[in-house]
Every structure is written in C-alpha cells, then in structure tokens.
Image (cartoon, rainbow, N blue to C red):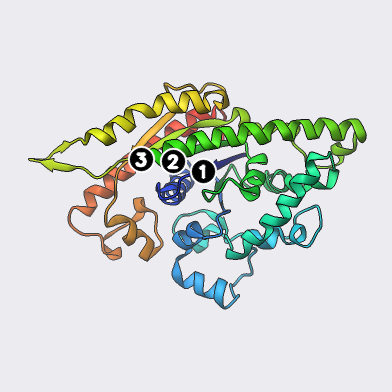
C-alpha cells in the first residue's frame, strides 16, 4: 500500500478538485482500491465526494447509515490524552458515492487536536515515547489499513502546523498542486524549509529515545525517519485564464515569467526530496486548465468530472471540456504511477 499527501502551503490552487478526481481515476480506470482521507478541517473533499445532503446529515444531524468514523473520531483518543488512535475505523464505502472511493470524512472539530499534537511534538523533542507515538498516529493508521487499500490519498489544508506535520510523518510520498502566482512559489519554499527543519529534529529525537530506552520503540509502529524526505513525486500547475484572439491563446508576460521560473524553484527547494527515479525532468505532472462552470456543476451533483453527463446538466462546450480534462487526468495519473516507482 502507498500513502500519498496532496499538499501546498498556498490555498486556492485546485488541490481538492485534483485530489478527488485523481482518486476517482485510479479507482475506476486503474482498478485500484482507493481511500481518500480528508485531513482539512474545512472538509472540502468530503463535501465534493458526498455532497451537501451528506454534510447536513452527518455534521449537523450526526447521522449516517451505516455508521462511519470521521478523522476526528479516529484521533479522539489522542485528543483525550492517549498515545494511540482508535481501532474503530469505518470509512464511507465506495458504493455510497460516484467517485468509487472509500472516504474517511473530515471534521471541522479536527482542528481542536492541533494543540494536543503541538504539545506531543514538544514531548517528542525530549525523546518521550508517548510524544513519538502520538506524532506517528498516521504511521499506525496506514499500518492498520495496508491490506485493505492499494493507495491512500491524504487531502491536507495549507497549514504548516502540527496536524499536517503528523500526517506527513506517516506518508510515503507527497506532491504539490500549484497555481501560477508568486505565492504558490513561496509556498513551495516554505514547505521545503519547514520539512527540512522538523525532519532533522524528528530523527534526532528518535535517536535520543533509543539511547534512553533501547528497543522500546520497536513495540510500536514508529518511523525511524520520515519517508517523505525522499518521497517528493512532483507538481501540477493550474493554468491562468487568458484572452484568446481568433481561438489562439494570448499569453500574459507576468504569468509566463512565473511559469518559467517554477522548475528552477522546485529543483532548488525540493530537489533533495525527490523520490527514487524522479528528477526535475519528470517532476512536472501536468498543467491543469481552468474549468469554469464544470467545477460548480461537479460539486452540485457530487461527481468526478470524468463522469459528468447530460442528466447532470452537462451542455454545449462543457462536453469537450470534460473530455479534455479526462485526457489530462489520464496523463497526470500515468505520470504519478510512473514516479511512484512501485507496483500498486
């Protein structure tokens, strides 16, 4: 099983739309067993996959049949002061949505655990086993599910906080959806500096704990070093809206300058994190076009874009936009598959 985090320090780059549509493609076209875990307290992936009616039923009325567990439920023991997650993991099954994926829904209250994980990080820095276990909750989570899924997508918010750090500690790989703006580039630089800093502290803490308590960590699912430090598989670029004259796209110099600079920034900032077989020549996974009315349409019917049809309200030029997007998702998925370098 492979765990993959979708992450950028810059919001508004189409991360959740891309995550959910990639997950649907892997499930439908590659026939893989897919789980999406919504780790963003805004719960955008949960709403896209399940729709507004689900949001009302689950978040407001606290009902869903059959019963399911949110990401907050899974971490409730840690929120209550324990060092391990709940063993009761009940995702929404793929039969309940059009994306054909299982889903651990997010929860607005998930942000409450941020303080508990922040305190656990300080415990970890002192070599404390409990603190190390809490920060490895995702390592434990993935271990519990490794026989059930081929690939888990983690949809993260843009924060550089303790929640995302703990998710990344347990992940194998990550990729960065980007926009054509200076803040996306700055976000990548922030990620590189942030991961470099805490990964070194993490490894030092593991060494310290082993010195003080030889062999004790082997009783738990603990990573000696975060695999993502050699697990970056690439980036996507969300295209900017351009004017066209007689059907020909007219580039804007400011945006084109940003686009031209991205490979150099990626290589200098995240090059040391590249996964085996990945370099700057294959790190770019694809350009994601602006989808205009397709996104709100897909949201309104809780469908992957590749599955939109007449009955959903698809009309006119939207059919070609859907086909173009499907071709793109196929290309990006194939490149991701290749950069993972593993049979999944």
To which quarter of the image does residue 63 belong? bottom right
Marks 3 and 2: which is nearer the front? 3
Quarter the C terminus occupies: top right
The mark total stands at 3
- Secondary structure beneath disc 3? loop
Which mark, residue 177? 2
Image height of 163 relative to 66, above or below: above
- Spatial separation of the CA atoms under disc 1 and disc 3: 18 Å
Badge 2, how many Cα within 10 Å: few under 14, some, many 20+? many
User: Are the residues at dot 1 and dot 2 in contact (C-beta closer than 8 Å)?
Assistant: yes
Could you say where residue 102 lies in the image, as x and y percent from the top left? 56, 55
User: Are the residues at dot 3 and dot 2 in contact (C-beta closer than 8 Å)?
Assistant: no
Quarter the N terminus occupies: top right
Could you say where residue 132 lies in the image, as x and y percent from the top left? 79, 43
- Disc 1 marks which residue? 6
- Disc 3 marks which residue? 181
- Secondary structure beneath disc 2? strand
Q: Nearer the viewer, residue 333 or 83?
A: 83
Badge 3, how many Cα within 10 Å: few under 14, some, many 20+? some
Image height of 57 relative to 24, above or below: below
Could you say where residue 37 lies in the image, as x and y percent from the top left? 58, 52
Left or right of 240, for residue 301 = right
Badge 1, how many Cα within 10 Å: few under 14, some, many 20+? many
- Spatial separation of the CA atoms under disc 3 and disc 2: 12 Å
Q: Residue at x 46, y 72 (%)?
A: 53
Q: Nearer the viewer, residue 287 or 336?
A: 287
Farthest right residue? 213
Q: Residue at x 39, y 58 (%)?
A: 303
- Spatial separation of the CA atoms under disc 1 and disc 2: 7 Å
């Amino acid at each position: 099983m492979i765990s993959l985090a979708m992450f950028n320090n810059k919001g508004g780059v189409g991360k959740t739309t891309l995550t959910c549509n990639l997950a649907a493609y892997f499930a439908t076209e590659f026939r893989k067993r897919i789980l999406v875990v919504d780790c963003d307290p805004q719960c955008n992936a949960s709403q896209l996959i399940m729709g507004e009616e689900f949001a009302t039923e689950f978040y407001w009325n606290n009902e869903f049949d059959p019963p399911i567990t949110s990401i907050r439920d899974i971490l409730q023991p840690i929120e209550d002061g324990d060092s391990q997650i709940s063993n009761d993991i009940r995702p929404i099954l793929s039969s309940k949505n059009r994306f054909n994926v299982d889903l651990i829904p997010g929860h607005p209250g998930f942000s409450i655990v941020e303080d508990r994980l922040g305190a656990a990080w300080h415990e970890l820095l002192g070599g404390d086993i409990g603190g190390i276990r809490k920060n490895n909750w995702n390592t434990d989570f993935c271990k519990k599910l490794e026989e059930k899924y081929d690939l888990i997508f983690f949809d993260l918010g843009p924060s550089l906080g303790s929640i995302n750090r703990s998710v990344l500690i347990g992940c194998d790989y990550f990729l960065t959806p980007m926009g054509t703006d200076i803040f996306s580039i700055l976000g990548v630089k922030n990620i590189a500096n942030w991961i470099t800093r805490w990964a070194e502290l993490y490894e030092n803490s593991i060494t310290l704990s082993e010195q003080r308590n030889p062999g004790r960590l082997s009783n738990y699912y603990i990573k000696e070093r975060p695999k993502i430090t050699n697990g970056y598989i690439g980036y996507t670029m969300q295209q900017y809206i351009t004017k066209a004259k007689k059907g020909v796209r007219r580039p804007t110099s400011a945006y084109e300058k940003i686009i031209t600079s991205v490979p150099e920034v990626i290589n200098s900032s995240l090059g040391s994190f590249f996964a085996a077989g990945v370099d700057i020549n294959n790190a770019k996974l694809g350009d994601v076009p602006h989808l205009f009315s397709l996104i709100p349409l897909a949201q309104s019917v809780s469908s992957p874009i590749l599955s939109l049809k007449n009955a959903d309200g698809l009309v006119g030029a939207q059919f070609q936009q859907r086909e173009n997007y499907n071709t793109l998702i196929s290309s990006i998925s194939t490149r991701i598959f290749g950069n993972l370098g593993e049979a999944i």
